[in-house]
């Protein structure tokens, strides 16, 4: 499976971009995670409030149980204490839960916005570029090296024709001083190399 181009310069360019992207993502990803942890740490306040409300409710239950043994009025006193403590503790407990949830949502949103601001511009340029190069070299490898059921000479001629009709003159002149003459006289090897290089493949 082709991951990088076969041509040295193109391969080094792709590998450098891959490495730079990895370092960039790890660096900013770590900062994003630290930001989230820092902000999410404030959710402990909500958990503390929630625990306080639950403790108040439990205290009402405990006190009610201890008062239930009073003669005549024990059960009534127990219910009054339980209801009073539960009525005071339940809103506190619910507020703590809502506060914790709100802080976690804010932490998540801010961390995502920070991630988008730092990673988004880089990845929006790198991923399409890298995907296009990856698809190009894989498709070219399959079309040129794997699929053909004809001889090397015919493949070379087809590559030369594609080079003459597709590549600009400046690129062709990097591989042959006379691209049109090569094509007309049947010297296809240098033109074929130009076509292969344009898709990241070695001869």
Image: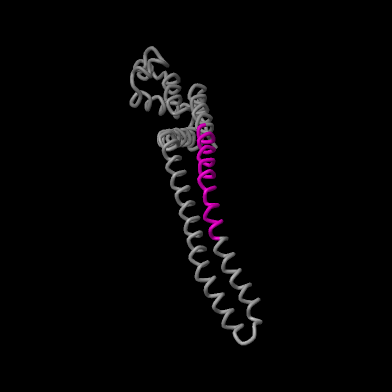
Q: Is residue 4 visible?
A: yes
Position of residue 40 in the picture relative to residue 183 (left or right): right
Q: Is residue 149 visible?
A: no
Residue farthest top in this picture: 177
Return the x and y of residue 189 as percentages of the image width and height: 45, 20
How many marks on residues? Answer: 0
- Above or below: residue 90 compared with residue 30: below
Return the x and y of residue 72 as percentages of the image width and height: 61, 87
Q: Give me the residue at 64% from left, 82% from top.
A: 70
Q: Which residues are magenta?
A: 24-50
Position of residue 60 in the picture relative to residue 157 (left or right): right
Return the x and y of residue 133 as percentages of the image width and height: 44, 32
Q: Give me the residue at 52% from left, 28% from top.
A: 15
Q: Main secondary structure of the magenta part?
A: helix
- Above or below: residue 22 compared with residue 92: above
- Above or below: residue 162 compared with residue 34: above
Residue farthest bottom in this picture: 72
Q: Give me the residue at 51% from left, 31% from top.
A: 18
Quadrant (top left/top right/bottom left/bottom right) for the N terminus: top right
Image coloring type: one colour
In this rendered view, identify the residue nearer to me: 51 or 164: 51
Q: Give me the residue at 56% from left, 61% from top.
A: 52
In this rendered view, identify the residue nearer to me: 182 or 185: 182
Question: Quadrant of the rendered structure where residue 62 is?
Answer: bottom right
Return the x and y of residue 203 as percentages of the image width and height: 50, 24
Whether the magenta-drawn stretch holds residue 103 is answered as: no
Whether the magenta-drawn stretch holds residue 44 is answered as: yes
Question: Quadrant of the rendered structure where residue 198 is?
Answer: top left
């Amino acid at each position: 499976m082709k991951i990088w181009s076969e041509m040295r310069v193109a391969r080094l360019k792709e590998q450098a971009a891959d490495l730079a992207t990895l370092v960039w993502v790890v660096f900013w990803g770590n900062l994003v995670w630290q930001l989230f942890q820092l902000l999410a740490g404030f959710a402990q306040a909500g958990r503390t409030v929630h625990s306080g409300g639950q403790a108040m409710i439990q205290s009402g239950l405990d006190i009610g149980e201890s008062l239930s043994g009073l003669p005549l009025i024990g059960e009534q006193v127990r219910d009054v204490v339980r209801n009073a403590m539960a009525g005071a503790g339940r809103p506190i407990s619910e507020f703590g839960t809502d506060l914790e949830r709100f802080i976690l949502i804010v932490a998540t949103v801010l961390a995502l916005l920070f991630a988008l601001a730092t990673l988004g511009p880089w990845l929006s340029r790198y991923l399409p570029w890298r995907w296009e190069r990856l698809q190009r070299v894989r498709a070219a490898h399959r079309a040129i090296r794997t699929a053909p059921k004809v001889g090397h000479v015919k493949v070379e001629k087809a590559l030369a024709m594609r080079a003459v009709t597709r590549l600009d003159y400046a690129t062709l002149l990097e591989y042959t001083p006379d691209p049109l003459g090569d094509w007309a006289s049947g010297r296809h090897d240098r033109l074929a190399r130009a076509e292969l290089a344009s898709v990241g493949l070695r001869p």
